[in-house]
Amino acid sequence: MRGSTFISTALKGAAMGVAEVIPGVSGGTIAFITGIYERLLASISSIGPGLWKTWKTGGLRAVWEQLDGNFLLALLVGMLLGLIAGVFGVSYILEHYPPVIWSFFFALIIASSIYMIRQVKTWSIPNVMLLVLGVGIAYGITVLVPSNGSEALWFVYLSGCLAITALILPGISGSFILLLLGMYTFVIPTVKSFLKTGSMDALTVVLVFGLGCITGVVLFSRVLTYVFKNYKNATIALLTGFMIGSLNKIWPWRICGEELVLADKVKCIRELNVLPNAYTGDSMLVGALLAFAVGIVMVWFLAKSDRS
C-alpha cells in the first residue's frame, strides 16, 4: 500500500472512529459513503479458523494478504486516533455547542441516505418494503427508553458484542446502543480514565469491552458479507431505512421529556424534538445551518474521493 493510500484509508478510519463516539451516528455510514464498506466486511470476515490453514500452507505473508492487512492496519490506526479525538474533542463540543454538532451529523445522515438510495440498482416492491421496514425498526430503537445498565464484566462484554455491530451497520450507532443499554455513561468515562491515568481497573473494563467487540464484529461481519453478496439491492434498501429512521435521534434541537433521578445526578431518559424557537437553550441557528451545509459538502467530497 502506497503512503498516500495508507493516509487516505487512515483518514477514513479516523472519521469512522469519531462517528462511533456520537450516539446516533454510525461508523458504518462513513465506511459506506467512502467506498470501503464491502472491502471492510471482506477483511473482517476473513478472520477465523481458515487463517490457521493459510498460515500452515503460506506462512505469515499469506495470512497478511488474506486479511488485507495493509488496509486493515491503516483503518485501525485511523479509527484509534478518531476514537481518542472523539472521546475528548467531540464530547466537549456536544456539551457546549449541541445544536451545531447535531446539525452537522443530521446533514451527514440525510446526504448519506440519498447517496445510498442511488446505489440501489433495481427498486422492486420487496426492496421498497425493506426500506420502510428499516425506517420503522430504526425509529423504534430511537424512542426506546434507556435501561440503567450494569458494571458487571459479563454485561460489559455483552455490550461490546452488541455495540460493535453498529460499526459495520450503517444507520445504527454503537454509541446509541450503549446508551440504550445504560452503558454509555460508564464505558466512555472509563475509557477516558484509562487514557488519562492508566488505571488497572479501567484497563480491565476496556479489555473486556474490547473482547466483546472482537467477538461481535467477527460473527456479524459474516452475516453481512453473505447478504451483501447474494441480496445487495435489498440489503442496501434495508440499511438506508435504518439511516433514515435514525434521524429522529439526531435532530439538532431537543429538550428533556422525562428524567430519572439517580443517587447523585439527574439523567434525561427521553428527549423531545422541538423547533429552534422552542429550544430551551441557545438555538445557535446560524452556526447550525452552517454546520448543516458543511455536512452536505463533506458527504459529497467523501463520495467523490479516491476509493482505493
Image (cartoon, rainbow, N blue to C red):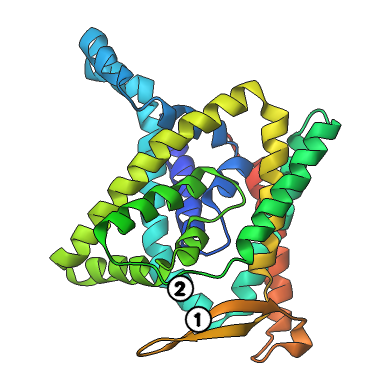
At label 1, which amino acid type do we have? Answer: Glu
Element carrying mark 1: helix
Residue drawn at x 51%, y 76% is 93
| Rendered view: 46 above or below 262 | above
Point out which mark residue 95 bears.
1
Instruction: Report how far apart the C-alphas of labels 1 and 2 lie in the structure.
Output: 6 Å
Percent coordinates x, y for residue 214 in the rendering: 34, 42
Name of the residue lying farthest toward the left: 200
Residue drawn at x 44%, y 53% is 163
Residue drawn at x 25%, y 58% is 153
Q: Is residue 211 left or right of residue 15?
A: left
Percent coordinates x, y for residue 245 in the rendering: 70, 56
Could you tell me which quadrant the N terminus lies in? top left
Q: Nearer the viewer, residue 155 or 104?
A: 155
At label 2, which amino acid type do we have? Answer: Ser
Q: Is residue 297 visible?
A: no
| Rendered view: 279 above or below 251 | below
Mark 1: give few (<14), some (14-19) or many (20+) Cα within 10 Å.
few
Residue drawn at x 75%, y 84% is 276
Q: Is residue 239 visible?
A: yes
Name of the residue lying farthest toward the top: 57
Could you tell me which quadrant the C terminus lies in? top right
Percent coordinates x, y for residue 96 in the rendering: 52, 84
Percent coordinates x, y for residue 307 in the rendering: 58, 34
Element carrying mark 2: helix
Q: Is residue 173 left or right of residue 298?
A: left
Query: Mark 2 sits on what residue?
Result: 91
Q: Are marks 1 and 2 in contact (CB under 8 Å)?
A: yes
| Rendered view: 48 above or below 277 | above
Q: Nearer the viewer, residue 189 or 134?
A: 134
